[in-house]
Image: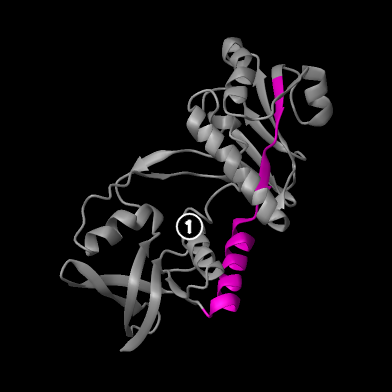
């Protein structure tokens, strides 16, 4: 059996787990990060890479829209090399609700989101791929982000600062509990099959869609997760310089995100019982 001892054990190698690992390292606290697959193997890698301005949620959830704006501003400041600050545009076409489009600027203002009114001609001047049927358009500070580079660099910095460790292909199987407190985690190297025991003063559950399952291993059934799966379509060219959003309530297939030399159209959203 392999054994490790650490101040903090983090379960889940996505954006949250890697972010916690780096945050701890900046405070001088060493930690171990484990994932049963690899970095960004879940939602943190299976996304369209849109760094939301908050505009998508402005009309339906002001609080979430404002949070997106704040988080985007932070990421643009601390990780500009992982971000393409390409801007975005919200577009309504014939058949869309013109009243919803007219309310959009006020909704953005309520969330503190910059919003520039564009004429249909000005919108097509910015994004030639737009159709002639545009009836309203607004420019917002959307951007795109490389989640893989962001997470890899966070883990790398944590390792350099404190000697923190990342163990891929390490699945959590249970916890040792003494007096109501977790004292060790029981895990397994899913490649070699070797058992692993990790003692830690604190444990962070950053397992995303699987966090309810991890909590249940510790005897807690209070973490309830509603999982949703989606499908993305990739083009073989970059269709636009910036992000294109449909100017309508959030739904399926309403965002086109440029990523390097390609574009990503997404996404669908289907609730599922089991994230596996």
User: Residue tagged by mark 1?
Assistant: 16
For residue 142, what is the image quadrant?
A: top right
Please state if 20 lies on the left or on the right of 139 as rendered: left
Residue 165 in view in this figure: yes
Choose between 110 and 261: the one closer to the eye: 110
| x and y percentages locating residue 226 in the rendered image | 33, 43
| x and y percentages locating residue 143 in the rendered image | 68, 43
Q: Which residues are magenta?
A: 137-163
Q: Residue furthest top?
A: 99
Classify mark 1: helix, strand or loop.
Answer: helix
Dividing the image into 4 quarters, which one contains the C terminus?
Answer: bottom left
| Above-or-below relation of 200 to 212 | below
Q: Is residue 142 magenta?
A: yes
Q: Is residue 119 magenta?
A: no
Dividing the image into 4 quarters, which one contains the N terminus?
Answer: bottom left
| x and y percentages locating residue 81 in the rendered image | 73, 58
| x and y percentages locating residue 268 in the rendered image | 48, 38
> For the point 38% across and 84% down, which residue is it?
192
> For the point 62% across and 60% down, which residue is it?
150
Q: Residue furthest bottom?
A: 1
């Amino acid at each position: 059996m392999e054994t490790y001892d650490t101040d903090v054990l983090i379960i889940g190698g996505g954006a949250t787990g890697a972010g916690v690992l780096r945050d701890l390292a900046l405070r001088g606290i060493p930690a171990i990060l484990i994932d049963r697959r690899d970095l960004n193997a879940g939602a943190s890698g299976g996304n369209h890479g849109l760094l939301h301005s908050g505009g998508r949620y402005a009309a339906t959830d002001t609080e979430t829209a404002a949070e997106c704006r704040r988080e985007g501003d932070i990421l643009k400041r601390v990780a500009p090399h992982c971000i393409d600050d390409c801007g975005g545009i919200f577009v309504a076409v014939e058949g869309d609700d013109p009243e919803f489009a007219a309310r959009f600027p006020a909704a953005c203002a309520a969330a503190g989101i910059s919003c520039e009114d564009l004429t249909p001609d000005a919108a097509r001047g910015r994004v030639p791929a737009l159709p002639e049927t545009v009836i309203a358009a607004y420019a917002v500070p959307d951007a795109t982000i490389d989640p893989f580079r962001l997470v890899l660099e966070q883990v790398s910095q944590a390792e350099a600062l404190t000697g923190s460790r990342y163990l891929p292909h390490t699945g959590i199987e249970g916890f040792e509990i003494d007096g109501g407190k977790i004292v060790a985690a029981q895990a397994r190297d899913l490649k070699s099959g070797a058992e692993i025991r990790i003692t830690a003063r604190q444990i962070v559950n950053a397992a995303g869609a699987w966090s309810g399952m991890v909590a249940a291993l510790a005897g807690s059934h209070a973490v309830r997760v509603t999982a949703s799966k989606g499908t993305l379509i990739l083009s073989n060219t970059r269709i636009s310089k910036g992000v294109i959003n449909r100017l309508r309530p959030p739904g399926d297939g309403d965002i086109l995100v440029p990523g390097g030399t390609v574009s990503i159209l997404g996404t669908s959203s289907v609730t599922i019982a089991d994230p596996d």
